[in-house]
């Protein structure tokens, strides 16, 4: 995605309103270029810029935030997961403010692209870019609503100070954007670009989050039975080899990315070095049976410290950031269909990963089994905390307080926009 990088930088500088990093919903134009002045020949550069904003703006920690809050990680041998969770869940925490600012910053660019494309005549490049923009707007709002609940809903860019919008309306907006996207996209050149299948995968996730189980199962099964994807080995998925699992990922090239997840997980004792900020708890390590084929690609022991091994570059480079893959669809289908109809999908995944079939005796036990499988399958991929929140298990599992199932609105945003209200408890 780097061939148009410098053109993107110049054009995006003209298109984006200048704003402070802690003031993304209070935007003022200093060097804005009217969307009417953009030509069709500029759209490819805008497209690459949009991908770069979506990839970089939220900051590296927000690609693993639900892991940091999910109880599987700690900061040191004598620390605890709860310490990491409570220290992160502060209105003054930089990870929280970077996520809020980053999602709205990239949303601003996405809205710009949508506005520009809607002013252009239909063409292949315009339609592709517009479809991708609708997907990215849906993905951004999924990230926002699952973290903060009611969030400002910006149908278009504005200089007004927005109010928070009810979650139900945000979810409806996400679904509408995915529908708009599906009308414009089909196959992609590679899984590093948004495709119709990436839309379906996000739809399945969105439906499950809302408890729309029939729709979630239908979307997941559409991908599972399409013949285009299949469960594959972690060695291929997480070592940038050709594989049948990935539906959509950010390629995250070193020359254009600030997202280095591996640096946070690998310790400095690894040959590729790393800060080693987060290590896997012993309890989580013990979830993985010796026969589990995922174990060695998920966990690596570096000088006595158990580290996440899915991102192998350390400080030497960057690794792809996977947004959706077919294993998640197996787990969505299983959970959405319930014990009677979903057990087959759960056991298919377990068997492929080297584990025996199970036979839970109740729906409650089945849900626990699905969540445990998600915990092992998706460790380090940004799912665990919200899995516990959406199933009502976060408080009892993590030991947090009821209000901590939502993130705090950053204190700087509350100061700058008096129309915003804090989440209760903070």
Image (cartoon, rainbow, N blue to C red):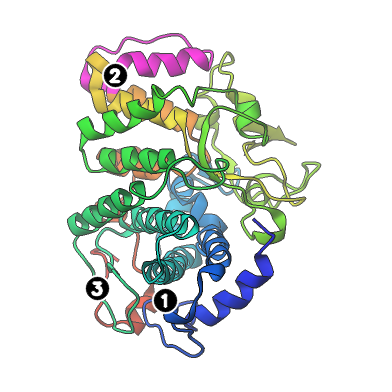
First to last magenta residue range: 343-366
> Relative to residue 397, is residue 317 drawn left or right?
right
| Distance (Cα) linking label 2 and label 3 | 41 Å
Tags 3 and 1 in contact by the CB under 8 Å rule?
Answer: no
Label located before the other in sequence (2 or 1):
1
Camera-side residue of 390 and 156 = 156
Which of label 2 and label 3 is nearer to you?
Answer: 2
Label located before the other in sequence (2 or 3):
2
Q: Which residue is mark 1?
A: 24
For this orientation, the residue located farthest to the bottom is: 30
Camera-side residue of 18 and 381 = 18
> Relative to residue 2, is residue 165 drawn left or right?
left
Position in image of residue 374 (x %, y %) = 42, 30
Residue 101 in which image quadrant: bottom left
Tags 2 and 1 in contact by the CB under 8 Å rule?
Answer: no
The image's mark for residue 342 is 2
> Relative to residue 240, is residue 85 drawn left or right?
left
Q: Residue at x 42, y 32 (%)?
A: 328
- Residue 384 visible in the picture: yes
Asked if the stretch drawn in magenta spans residue 388, the answer is no
Quadrant for the C terminus, please: bottom left
- Residue 372 visible in the picture: no
Q: Is residue 253 above or below residue 372?
A: below
Position in image of residue 398 (x %, y %) = 36, 42
Position in image of residue 372 (x %, y %) = 40, 27
Q: Dot 3: within a 10 Å radius of its alpha carbon, few (fewer than 14), some, or many (20 or more) residues?
A: some
| Distance (Cα) linking label 3 and label 1 | 16 Å
Q: Dot 1: within a 10 Å radius of its alpha carbon, few (fewer than 14), some, or many (20 or more) residues?
A: many
Camera-side residue of 14 and 276 = 14
Q: Residue at x 26, y 40 (%)?
A: 207
Quadrant for the N terminus, please: bottom right
Which of label 3 and label 1 is nearer to you?
Answer: 1
């Amino acid at each position: 995605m780097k061939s148009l990088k410098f053109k993107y930088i110049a054009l995006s500088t003209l298109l984006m309103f200048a704003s402070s990093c802690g003031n993304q919903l209070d935007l003022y134009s200093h060097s804005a270029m009217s969307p009417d002045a953009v030509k069709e020949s500029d759209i490819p550069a805008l497209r690459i810029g949009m991908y770069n904003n979506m990839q970089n703006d939220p900051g590296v920690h927000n690609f693993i935030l639900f892991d940091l809050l999910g109880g599987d990680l700690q900061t040191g041998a004598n620390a605890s997961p709860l310490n990491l969770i409570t220290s992160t869940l502060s209105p003054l925490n930089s990870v929280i403010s970077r996520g809020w600012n980053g999602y709205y910053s990239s949303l601003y660019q996405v809205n710009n692209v949508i506005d520009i494309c809607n002013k252009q005549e239909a063409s292949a490049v315009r339609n592709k870019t517009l479809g991708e923009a609708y997907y990215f707007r849906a993905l951004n709002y999924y990230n926002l609503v699952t973290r903060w609940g009611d969030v400002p809903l910006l149908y278009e860019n504005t200089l007004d100070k927005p109010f928070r919008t009810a979650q139900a309306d945000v979810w409806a907006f996400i679904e509408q954007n995915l529908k708009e996207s599906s009308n414009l996209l089909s196959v992609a050149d590679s899984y590093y670009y948004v495709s119709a299948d990436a839309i379906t995968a996000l739809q399945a996730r969105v439906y499950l989050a809302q408890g729309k189980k029939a729709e979630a199962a239908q979307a997941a099964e559409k991908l599972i039975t399409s013949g285009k994807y299949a469960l594959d080995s972690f060695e291929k998925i997480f070592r940038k080899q050709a594989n049948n699992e990935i539906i959509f990922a950010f390629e995250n090239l070193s020359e254009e990315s600030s997202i280095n997840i591996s640096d946070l997980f690998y310790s400095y004792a690894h040959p590729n070095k790393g800060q080693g900020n987060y290590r896997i708890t012993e309890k989580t390590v013990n979830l993985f049976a010796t026969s589990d084929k995922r174990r060695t690609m998920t966990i690596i022991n570096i000088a006595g410290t158990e580290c996440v091994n899915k991102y192998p570059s350390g400080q030497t480079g960057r690794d792809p950031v996977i947004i959706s893959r077919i294993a998640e669809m197996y787990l969505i289908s299983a959970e959405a269909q319930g014990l009677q109809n979903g057990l087959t999908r759960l056991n298919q995944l377990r068997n492929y990963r080297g584990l025996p079939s199970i036979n839970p005796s109740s729906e409650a036990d089945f849900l626990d089994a699905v969540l445990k499988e998600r915990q092992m399958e998706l460790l380090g991929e940004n799912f665990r905390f919200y899995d516990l929140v959406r199933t009502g298990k976060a408080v009892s599992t993590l030991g947090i307080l009821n209000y901590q199932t939502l993130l705090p609105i950053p204190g700087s945003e509350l100061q700058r926009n008096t129309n915003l209200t804090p989440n209760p408890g903070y």
